[in-house]
Structure formats: structure tokens, C-alpha cells
Amino acid sequence: MNKHAQPDLQAAGIKGGVASDQRHDSAHKHVTGSAVYIDDFPEPAGLLHGCLGLSAIANGRIVSMDLSAVQVASGVVAVLTASDVPGVNDISPTGRHDEPILAEGEVLFHGQPVFAVIAQTREAARRACKLAKIEYEERPFVTDIGDLDAEADKLVTPPLTLKRGDAHEAIAAAPRRLKGHMRVGGQDHFYLEGHIALAIPGEDDDVTVHSSTQHPSEVQHMVAHALGVASHAVTVEIRRLGGGFGGKETQSNQFAAIAAIAAKKLKRAVKIRPDRDDDMIATGKRHDFIIDYEVGFDDDGRIAGVDFLYGARCGFSSDLSGPVTDRALFHCDNSYFYPAVKARSAPFFTNTVSNTAFRGFGGPQGMMGAERIIDEIAFVLGKDPLEVRKANFYGTGDRNVTPYHQTVEDNIVHRIVSELEASADYAKRRAEIDAFNGESRIVKRGLALTPVKFGISFTATHFNQAGALVHVYTDGSVHLNHGGTEMGQGLYVKVAQVVAEEFQIDIDQVKITATTTDKVPNTSATAASSGSDLNGMAAQNAARQIKDRLCDFAAKKYGLEKDQIIFLPNRVRLGNQEIPFADLVKQAYMARVQLSAAGFYKTPKIHWDRDKGEGHPFYYFAYGASCAEVSIDTLTGEYLVERVDILHETGRSLNRAIDLGQIEGGFIQGMGWLTTEELVWDDKGRLRTHAPSTYKIPLASDRPKIFNVALADWAEAGEPTIHRSKAVGEPPFMLAMSVFHALSDAVASVSDHKVFPALDAPATPERVLMAVERVRSTLPQRASIGGS
Amino acid sequence: MTRSHLHFLLNGENVTLSDVRPDETLLDFLRLRRSLKGTKEGCAEGDCGACTVLVGRLSGGNLVYEGVNSCIRFTGSLDGCHVVTIEHLRGTDGGLHPVQQAMVDFHGSQCGFCTPGFVMSLYGLWMREPNPADATIEKALQGNLCRCTGYEAIMRAARAVSHYGEAGRDPLVSERAEIIARLKAMRDGKRVEIGAGKERFVVPASLDDLAAVVETEPNARVVSGSTDVGLWVTKHFRDISPVVFIGGLDELRQVSEADDVITIGAGVSYTDAYAALAGRIPALRPLLDRIGGDQVRNMGTIGGNIANGSPIGDTPPPLIALGAELTLRKGDARRTIKLEDFFIDYGKQDRAAGEFVEALHVPVPEDGMLFAVHKITKRRDEDITAVLGAFHLRIEGGSVVSARIAYGGMAAIPKRALAVEAKLVGQPWTVETVEAAMMAFESDYQPISDMRASGDYRMIVARNLLMRVFLESEGETAHVARYEVAR
């Protein structure tokens, strides 16, 4: 791809158009170590390095700060505190002004950045940080939400209520009722490349910040805000992130702002790359939730009404907790119709790091509530949970209105689930597992099939816009830029495929360039699975503008109707002759035709009235389903994922290889969330799981032993999305709920499904064993094997 | 006979280094001093594998390449070694190496940050096992974390590598004789001494030289694989000077097998001890397969696992249950003690100033003994123990004749379950006896709660592991295993 190849002018099709399994554009650089991440840049002369000094307590007033030892430590150039922020000491992404860059007067969580050391080397800065003497007046703190009250305790942002029908009445009138609650744990992103920012000062107010961020425009605005300068003075650029997953949607702001402040103050380039432990302690994670539920249903398991309360540990500031907890409510239905529903959120303040975006953005936690009630209803009725799931699926003609009053118009969950049920051989394996469990005293097996319906679009309607910039050079090669960031998900190559398709040129003629705020302004975060939907459309729009100009020019020059001009692979048919694409471009340039265009796209149809809790917040839904089988050891709680079958749809896929990678990777990440990834805070409010030695994401050997993943080839987007494809970033994450429910099913088998396991997430071996113990302890006759 | 510089090979280049601190990591040397930016820092604690490089060393005339975590490997420990980084890989045609091409073709990278580490691990695997089974690939990748792909694509690539090229044609294989000659030329039999005061380290020339150094400098830190000491530096900025690097001492890396005992030098890595320990004592194999990842097993030593006295070290409980003994040396004087007596209290071992662990003697269980080891963790592989139980029982005529049971993770030191043993010995080997013995665990242990497990969970599991041992001795399946076969 580096050498400029001559395009094939006789080709029947282009290389790398849409619906081709194009490899990741940087794959050859990833494998050779030549893909450049920010820490790999040649360092500017005189580069300084920053390290953040973190709070040692969970809540308290700063009585005094003695930084003199830090100041005089070897290699230290400057020490910054809140008073060194020239503009506004705030990086709240939603304008709530509740998140200082550096703590001012008080600290609200253990690990909150209080000061920054700037030194000649990274090591000198890190060592000096330890020398600070800060005296606190400690205050009581709250880290856990278990005892908090949605009505009385402090919230970080206004809660949301979704309501359709009278849930309480429906529950009261239902033949059967149940209520309960469950905990769903948080999750650290564990991107392999930690946070990093490199700020290079320019003339006047200017500064360029290289930031590992999913949201360059927001970094730009925050840096400008912090410096007290206009946005036009700040340029933010990012070629690639070493993973994001939501963890770099807002959390990059702090490092970028401090690096920029130091760079402008000291007139030298400044880089901040926190150590992994500091990164995990000082940056936000997935929200953990406590879900309270009450549901009324009939003897077939059909739900009549449901009432949910979703309490979330948001941390010390709002960050994105409002939209995250909103999205949890938007997914409290998953794929199920609730005739009457009330769902409330409680975004609780806690003295912990401020939780943030993470793949699914509250949706996974919302869906866990839906799947929990289904499981418990099935348990109460002695039915197979899959039967109850199917009884409650959204209909296609009726029973199709969501708790937020949007009608589900593109429902394919029935077909997805029935095809998966057949290909995974669900019924036969259910019987085999029952037989196995009858024979095996210690090892028990479990099976579950769970669906996913995930709403696509930012719920903040204004974020659903995108820009792109396309230049065609006189040799026919194309420069592509857009507002989306590349964090491994293959966005860049997908958008390049769209542009190659539009011009009908080989993809190696399209140069993919770094995302930067001075090429495409006012962009949205690359988040909410929206990357290729939005940026693909914007890039297509830019390419079409140029194509239209080329057509107009050619029609005039060659005396043709526009429909006589056809873009063929690497060439253009002009009436009865064909000329290379590059020749047409050259001719157009000579005739002074503009060969550059800014593209734009905004998602149609969507609207949302949060106060009323009504609207059409999602352009469409993405669907999938997963069937998981597990084994558990009832003496230790250890388990294995024996087999997983997935059927997932991405509409008419732009790139099946990339989409498959998103499905497999999303599933495993979701499985980690629900199994071994556990965040533990101690009685001092300190996070104890802040490195891979204590925080356990899945390994290769945690993959399902048998893993069958299929794309639903027959699916296509009902709306005119980019080439009728669908978003793929987040939806597969929630397929992993099947593993959690299979574990629960295995635990329930200990009592022959007589006692509900009430398993919480993450289902670590310890939680599985403790659930087994609970189930056993309620049995009339104590099992003779194992136990306390 | 000393010199004040290191010699080693970095990719194709001879490196001579005299300005090196004892706590400089190989990763910092590569990235900051040599601008070799292909090797990445993911965690700086040897857990994620993004920093994986290969280190070649002479072992009995052979040249062995092993993946290591460069983030916790000290530069000072590299004398006479060949460091191979991602930048050194190439195909025979100058293009992509077979491992790299397979990773590209099977979409094995997404964000790409972990990828150089995966490529290096798979490269090391391909050289020793061109057609690996899935279980072998998974074991080779236990020390590499990927957050994007879910590993499936990497597995596909790993299975296919041999279709892209023969290991025999790889430069590290075809140029082996030349590299051996270059490394041998670096071996001049001299002690290396570099730096002074807080920046001093020594690479002794021989085992006797080590004894002399440690005797004269009793505060010296003896470091082999640095899988623990590395973190003292990268995470806690502890001063470790003066350091004595012993990883290059062949005399300490010997494994010798007699009829009933295996003797393991204190510098023998888990990898090098594997064949003897797992071969002679098969019940140790699943445990050895789950200690750290490959990189940690290549660096870390059983001697270090013992000497550092951790309550959650994986090897002391089974070794105590087997009745292993330890030889400590000071100058020319040696003494041999029971391993269980070495651990006195948390952070306190029976090791005098100027003394170091020289060798470990592991008795092979006699015929008819029941020996079992079970390690319980949050994540199956590459995780630190929550509870580890080791059971060494003689059952004759249906009764327990003798019992040695030791646990890790249950007390401040690896500790025998004496009360439990007492409840078993002399009793019939039945479920009733086992249940009675399970009640005795509380006399032996009062486990703590931490981020790995609660005290309650540890206690229940500790008891249940005894039940597991019983049930499995009766032929009942009482565990889940991903692979029943050896890896």
C-alpha cells in the first residue's frame, strides 16, 4: 500500500470496494511494530514529561499542600496546581461544571489528580510525585451504592423516568408477581495503550495536542477552555488509538489539558503518559448498577407490567452518567414487549472515580435487568427460559412499542433466534445437559440462549452529524479525512472502501489520514457504534460532490448527457470511449474544476424529548443472539465455557472480516465483564484492582472451546444507511449475556431448578460457588458433598 | 578478573555498554536509548505481554530463544545474550515474516498495540513447535493480553503459520552457528562490575564468585528472573542496589535427577524445570502449566519463588507436601534444611546474612502415593493464586497411613494443614473421614479477604479441595479442565 501502484484499467471490479473483506489498513504496520502510536513519535527537542499527583484519601478538605520537596527533586522543571490553570478549571463534558482538572480545596475520590509534576524525564516526574506532603481533613465517604436511596441521596445528574401505561396497576392485576434485585459490576476498559497526550506549543495562543482520544473535538474545546483561548488556537490530532472502548471518549481531556497548560507555560513540548496503575485508578470505568425489579406476568410467562429502578455508581462527577443511565433505561426492554412499564434511573454520587462511557454505554446493564426478569419468571413457572423469552418478544405488527414510545419497525429477532436455536441444536442439547446433570454430582452444565436488540444513534440528537474532507489530486489519487477516529475497529478502512466504491477506484488510491480538528471541525465522538454510519455517509457525500462536478465537466466537454458518463473500475466511460479516472481528473483540473469537497451527514428521522420520555431516539436497531453452554465445578465455582454459537446481523456488511472481528472481540469483552473482571474497593475507598495482575480480562484460553460465529447474510438495514449496512461496534458485546445465564442455569441445576440462584455479575468463581452454596443450603436435605 | 561493561547482541548488532544502572529495564533501553519503538509498554509489570522480545542464551552449547517481558527484565542481566525485537523479523524475501503474514491474512490485529508482543510470542512458538495444537498455542499466549480481537483471529493465524514458511529457513535458525560463535566470544570468564553506590551491580563469573560476592556484600540483592523485583522498580521505585544478577550462571541452572530425588539449581527457570518435574511428578504438570505466562516461566525461577517468601507462591505448597529440602550457601559453607522450616513468618525466612539459596531437592513420590495439587484462581491462566492445596497421602488397605497437606493463600506463609492431617491419619479413607477432616481446617487457617477472594471463599474452597482429592481418588470427576491432555 505504500508504493503507488498503477491501477488496472481493464479490471472487472475495483480492489477494496464495499462488501469486500478488506484487511485493516494498518495490519502490515501492526505486525512489524511500525504502526506509530503517540509514544512512538520521535520526541521533540527539549521534551518534558508530566506525572499526576493523586489524592491519597477518598473524601476530604485539603488543609495544606507542601510541594517543596517535589519542586526541588532531581529533574523537576515545574509543579502545577489548580491555580496554574489559566482558563477554567473544569472538564465536565456536559457543562455541569463538576469536574476540576486539578483538585481545588477538596478531593472527592481516592486517586483524584491534585497536582502535576513536569520534569526532564518521565521517571523523574514519577519519582518526584511521591514526595508531596498533603494534609487532608478527612470526611466520611461512600463508595458503594448498596445502601443509597434514589429519593434521598445525592445524584450527579437528573434522573430519567420512562413510562408507558400504568405499570403498578398491571403488576397488581397480573396472575403472578415477583420482585427482586441484582448487582451488575463495572468494568475497566483495559485498552492496551494507556492514556497519553503530547502538547507542542506554537506561536500566539496556539497549541497542537496529540491525544489518544475518541473525541478530538471535545479535547480541542476542553483544552481551549482550560487555557482560556479560542478553539481556533487548538489543534488536536490522532492517527490511531491503541484501543478505546469508550474509555477515551471523555477521559483523554484531563491529560490533554494538563499537557497543554504545561506546554504553554513552559514553552516546551510536554508529554503525559500515566503508568498503567495510575491510568486505572484515575480514569473512569463502566458503571456498576443495582437493579430493583418488580414484574407481573401470567402462567405462560407473558409479562403484563414491569417496574425497574436502575441505580448506578457514577462517581464524584456527572461525566457522561446522564446519557449512560438514560441508555440503560432505553435497553431495559432488550427484545421484549412490556404492555405497561415504568423504569427509573438513579445516577448516584459516590466517592469513586467518575464512571464513563464503555462499549454499550449503559445498554448492557439495562439489558441485564430484562434478562434477569425473564430468567426468574421461567424459573418460577418451571419453564425453559427460552420459551419465556420467545413469549415476550416484540411483535412485528402489534406489541411493538418501546418504553420510550418508539415503534420497533425493523424487528428480526424471531428469525435470528429461531435460526440460532436450530443451528445450535438447542433442544437436543438441553436434553443432553439435563441427562448429564442427573449423572454428574460435582460438575454441572448449563445452557442459555439470549437475544440482543440494540438501539443505534446517539440519544443526544445533535451528535448525530458528521463531516468529511476529500481531495482528489491531479494524478487521480485521493486524500480522505473525516471526523471518526481509528481505535482498531476498522473505521478507516471501511470509510476508504466507501470512497473507493464511489469513485470506482482501487482502495490503494485512497490515502487514509489522521483525524484532526483543523480538517474536519465540530465532530462527534467516535462512539455509540456510529463511526461508519456517520462518517461513511459524510465521506460518500464529499465524494459525490466531486463526482458530480466531474460529470458536469465531462458532459460539457464531451457533449454528453450525464447518464452517458459511467464510473467503471479505475476508468470512466464517456459515451463510447473509456478514459482512465486519472485522465478525467487531470482534464478537470486543467479546466479549473474544484477537486476538493467537504462532506456532511445528519441522521434523519430521530428526535427525543427527555422531559416527556417520548420520541424516536434510534434510527434503527441491530440484532443478534447467542447460545452458550458452560460447565461449573460445584466444589470450587470454577467454570469453563464449553461452546458458544452466535448469529448476528450487521445489515449488508461493508466488510465481513472486520465485522466478524468486532463480533468475536465484543463477545469476549462482554464475557470478561460478566465473569472474571471484578473491580474491588477497600474500606479506605481505594481501588484494589488497578493492574492486570489483579484485574483479569479474558485470555486466549478463556475463549469458548467451540465458538461458532455467523453473520445473518440475509439481513439488510431497513433505513437507507451507508450501503444498507448496520453498526457493529457495541451490539455484539451483549451477546455475552448468554454465558452469564448459562452459568446461572448450571447453578440452578444443583437444586434441580428448585431454588433461584439470584446470581450477581460478575460471576467470578467465588460468586458461582457462593450461589451454589446458597442454593444447596435451602435444599431440604443437605447434599453430602462439599460445602461449609 | 573483572570488567566494567556488558556485552550482548541486539538484533544484528554487538552492544557494549558501561553506562547502565542496575534498575534500567530492557524496555527502556530499547525504546529510550535505541529508539526501537516497535516494542510496547502496556502494563510495566510483566502481565500483558505487549513488551515481549526474545532473548537467546547459550545453554550447554545450545542456543535457546525465549520470550521475555522486557518491561521487567533488567538490562544488566543480559550479558552474553542475544536480544531479538520485532524490528529484526523479516521474511526470507525481505517482506513480512511468516508469523506476520499469517497475522495480517487472518485479521489478527485490530488496534495493533498488543500485536508486536503476540508476534514475538508466536515467533518463539513457531521455532520450537511449527505445528502446534490449540492447547499449545493457548499456553504460549497465556502471557499476552488482547482487548480487541477476542483472540479467535490470532488463533487462526497461529494455526496457519507453518503454511507460510519453514522455521528451518528463519534467520535465527539458519544463522545459529554464527550467533553461537558471537555469543561464545563474549564469554571471557570475567566478573562484571558496573556503577557505584546506589547504582551498582555485579554479574558474578561463577557460582563460587557469587558466594564470594554475597558473603562480602550481605545486603546485595540476588536477582535472577526479576519477575518480582522488576515491579519493585517499575511500580515502587525501590532502591535495589547493589544487585547481583545470577541468571547467566550455568552452574545454578542445572537439573539433576536421581532415582528418588530431583535437584534443581536456584537459577533454574520454570521452563527449564518443566521436563524433570512434570515428567517425574505428573500431578505437577497442570500447576506448572498455569504459573504466570510463558514469558514469566522463561524468566522466573523456582529458587526465586521460594527465596522471596511470598504466601502465595505456587511452588512451595506442593514442595512442602513432597518433603522437599533446600540447600543454603554462605561462602563455602552449606546447610540443608526442610523447606517448610524455611518459612518463618510473613516476610521472614530462615536465611542468614550473606547466605543464598543454592539448590532445591525434590523427592519423587514413591509408588502408590496419592499426590495431587489444585490451584484456584479468578481467571484460569496467568493469575495469582487465591487458594492452592497440595496433598501427599499414603493410603493402604483403605486407610490413611500418612498425610502431608500444605496450602498457599490461606496464611501468612505457605503452611501445612497439621490439624487436618491429624484427622486423616489412621482413619479409613472414606467420605465420612474427609468430612470430619474438613471441619479441622479452621484450626489450621484463618484466611484473609482481599481483591482475589474473600476469607469465606478461601475456607470453603480449601475444605472442598480435600473432597475433590477424595472423590477423584474414587474415580469420580470433580473438576473442570479445558484440556485433559498435557500441554
Image (cartoon, coloured by chain):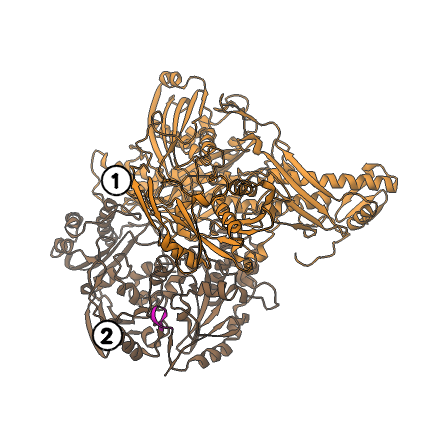
Chain colours: A orange, B brown
Q: Residue B33: percent from the left, percent from the top?
A: 49, 66
Chain letter for mark 2, please: B
Q: Quadrant of residue A156?
A: top left
Q: What residue appears at the point 26 percent right and 76 percent down from the top-left corner?
A: B216
* Amino acid type shown at disc 1: Glu
Q: Residue furthest left?
A: B426
Q: Residue A336: percent from the left, percent from the top?
A: 46, 27
* Amino acid type shown at disc 2: Arg
Residue A403 is at least partly visible in this image: yes
Q: What element does badge 2 sit on?
A: strand
Q: What element does badge 1 sit on?
A: helix
- Whether A61 is drawn above or below B381: the answer is above
Residue under label 1, please give it. A773
Residue under label 2, please give it. B329
Label 2 CA crowd tier, 10 Å (few <14, some 14–19, many 20+): many
Q: What residue appears at the point 40 percent right and 70 percent down from the top-left corner?
A: B76
The magenta-colored residue range is: B195-201
Q: Residue A565: percent from the left, percent from the top?
A: 81, 41
Q: Nearer the viewer, mark 2 or mark 1?
A: 2
Say left or right for A68 vs B103.
Answer: left
Q: Nearer the viewer, residue A752 or A348?
A: A348
Residue A439 is at least partly visible in this image: no
Q: Nearer the viewer, residue A284 or A722?
A: A284
Q: Is residue B197 magenta?
A: yes
Label 1 CA crowd tier, 10 Å (few <14, some 14–19, many 20+): many
Q: Is residue A451 magenta?
A: no
The quadrant of the image that shows the N terminus of chain A is: bottom right
Q: Nearer the viewer, residue B217 or B205?
A: B217
- Alpha-carbon distance for marks 2 and 1? 49 Å
The quadrant of the image that shows the C terminus of chain A is: top left
Q: Residue furthest bottom?
A: B1
